[in-house]
Image (cartoon, rainbow, N blue to C red):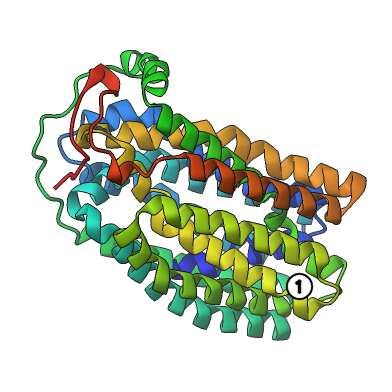
Amino acid sequence: MVGLAFMSSATVLPAFAESLGASTVLIGAIPAVMTVGWFLPPLFAAAHTERLPVKLPFVLRWTGWERVPFLVLTLVAFFLADRAPALSIWVMLAMLLVMTAVGGFLMPAWTDLVARTLPARLRGRFFGLASLAGTLGGIAGSALTAWVLDTLPSSTAYGVCFLAATVFIGLSWIALVVVREPPSTTAPAQADFWAHLGSVPALLRRDVNFTWYLGARALMFAAVTGSGFFTVYALRVLRAPQSDVGVFTALLLAGQMLGQLALGSVADRAGHRLVMIVAACAGLSMNVVALTASSLTVFSAVFALNGLLNAAIQVSAVNVLLEFAPTPQQNPTYVGIERTFLAPFGFALPLVGGLMIDAVGYAFVFGLSAAFSVACAAALFVVRDPRHRRSLSFGIGGVRDSPPNPL
């Protein structure tokens, strides 16, 4: 998370693309390609993941490719950006797709590892505190970001940021190596890829509550369409200097930090659904501020609110899926369904947002995002908290179980 702060998709990457002369649509492509990479592969990886008796060796074998793009982007900023800015934009998008696609492919295995390592009643606080530690480091990193953008040539400054991201992402791999994976208490699943994929529609028909949740998550993606353009709006419309990108990142991380301090305990005590409702409300607030702010000082609050939304997602978006799954064996399936279902929305909406900004302006996109925030919150109120279910009678194979506790 410290590494990602140096390469924030909400602040640093849009500003880098803007410095290369990228169009609004290409800037919108940054969250689009990252989302489709993270969200499209998991369902297709779920069947293979469920057949693995242990998950950590599989993750370690492939996660190196998740980190190589950081180094490539560093080289692009130092050696290519000034000479070929248009090519640099396309290389950046390609590297972001590689990075996130590998992460998306590994997501079911990683979340199953989380489910077997952490008891359900501790996951909110664990993710909250871990994210808080990363955010504190990221705030220090944002000071470096602001300094280098203010003192060094643009491409060199971004190269320094990407190099710092590369170093911290490498250190995260070392941390992952020393994790000890608990032994599985159940036999691996045996379903092949096509049988597994074909059973998904029946699962969604039986688990209506989960289907409602998927709809709410799609609305949440629509609610944050405008967030990918906050930095560009500040730079182009409000005339913020490039060095303010570091300030925006600090505000984003400060909002995350406050959310992480509070929301982990809220999730463990009151459920992850409530935290997702908080995310929807934060989305509404940031879009209203973006729509009504008349100065850069007021507008800067959108980054803190966006950070609060991010904190809610970090704490609960994955953990709630582990509670929807009726059995531990189905954790990868539920994660895969949610991720892959959302991929088209995450890919198309930022691009559509860029086109709408070019056609009718920023205000229309910010206002539309606010309306979707309200719809998302309403849909989440319809969803029943999966932690408090008394019994289940759905799932692949019609499994029936009590509320899940993987440990």
Q: Residue at x 68, y 57 (%)?
A: 227
Image quadrant where residue 287 sits: bottom right
Quarter of the image with the N terminus in it:
bottom left
> Foreground residue, 26 or 184?
184
The residue positioned 40% from the left and 38% from the top of the image is: 105
Residue 136 position by quadrant: bottom left
User: Which of 223 and 88 lies nearest the eye of the viewer?
Assistant: 223
Q: Position of residue 334 (x, y in %)?
A: 36, 34
Q: Is residue 253 visible?
A: yes
Name the residue nearer the viewer: 62 or 122: 122
Left or right: 236, with 32 as reference point: right
Residue 88 image point, x, y percent: 70, 53
* Amino acid found under the numbered disc labelled 1: Phe
Could you tell whether 388 is left or right of 82 in the image? left
Q: Residue at x 55, y 41 (%)?
A: 379
29 or 22: which is nearer to us? 29
The residue wearing badge 1 is: 299
x and y percent of residue 211 in the render? Answer: 46, 30
Vertical side of 34 occupied by 302: above or below: below
